[in-house]
Amino acid sequence: MTNALIVIDVQNDFCPGGALAVTEGDAIVAGINEVMEGFGAVVLTQDWHPVDHSSFADNHQGAAPFSMVEMPYGPQVLWPRHCVQGTQGAAFHGDLNSDRADMVIRKGFRALIDSYSAFFENDQKTPTGLEGYLRSRGVTDLVLAGLATDFCVAFSALDAAKLGFGVTVRMDLCRAIDLDGSLDAMVEKMRGAGVVLA
Ligand code: VGL
Ligand code: ZN
């Protein structure tokens, strides 16, 4: 059995002062660095959007940030512009030990589709390639940490469980956006899917 730590989107734009700041988003960085040592593999994910990304409210005329739209693949939250490719906002938090990462996987780089999960884009079928990477390295068990608990962490955990990995989410090493009760809803879904919340 090989385990992997999957660190979700610990990027400047999700930390205080960033474009889509998660409360205390930076408070988990030291703890994540500490646990990295204990894993057979460490993967970092990076939300990585083109400027014309369809998840940005300012690319939809008259739309307010955090409102909902219907995309061809289903409902989608419109976010403030964040994690634009190559910007400082898209860079990892400066204190995150990115040197320890074996693999960095970028997601959300297609303009017409968002990607919360590290495994599949929001159409739930376009793969990111992470599954193949983990399987070819013999990884069976995953521990997830990062931002945000109720979006990218939860979607990644649910997909991982569906794919048959053993999945633990370190809730103490995650922080949530919590939009209209999304945290409670996603915690419930993760429990139902057999994800261990630690
Ligand atoms: C995320 C909203 C939009 C996340 C990414 O990392 O949870 N949330 N893009
Ligand atoms: Zn995003």
Image: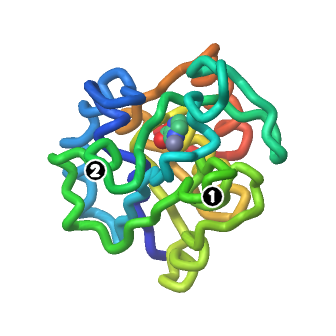
- As measured in the structure, the alpha-carbon distance from the residue carrying label 2 to the one carrying label 1 is 23 Å
| Disc 2 target residue | 92
The numbered mark at residue 6 is none
- Work out whether residue 32 or residue 57 is closer to the camera in this orientation and state it: 57
Are the residues flagged by discs 2 and 1 in contact, CB closer than 8 Å?
no
10 Å neighbourhood of mark 2: few (<14), some, or many (≥20)?
many
Tell me the colour scheme of the image. Answer: rainbow
The amino acid at mark 2 is Phe
**Relative vertical location of residue 197 with respect to residue 113 in this rendering, above or below:** above
- Work out whether residue 130 or residue 53 is closer to the camera in this orientation and state it: 53
Q: Is residue 116 left or right of residue 185?
A: left
Asked which quadrant contains residue 120, the reply is bottom right
Helix, strand or loop at disc 2?
Answer: loop
- Work out whether residue 195 or residue 65 is closer to the camera in this orientation and state it: 65
Residue at 43% in and 57% down: 45
10 Å neighbourhood of mark 1: few (<14), some, or many (≥20)?
many
Q: Is residue 76 left or right of residue 57?
A: right
Relative image position of residue 68 (x, y in whole percent): 71, 24
| Disc 1 target residue | 160
Instruction: Tell which residue pokes out farthest to the left in this image.
Output: 95
**Relative vertical location of residue 177 with respect to residue 137 in this rendering, above or below:** above
Residue 110 appears anywhere in the view:
yes
Relative image position of residue 154 (x, y in whole percent): 58, 41
Sequence-wise, the earlier of marks 2 and 1 is 2
Relative image position of residue 128 (x, y in whole percent): 60, 67
Helix, strand or loop at disc 1?
Answer: helix
Residue 197 appears anywhere in the view:
no
The amino acid at mark 1 is Ala
Residue at 41% in and 44% down: 83
Residue at 68% in and 46% down: 194
Residue at 46% in and 39% down: 198
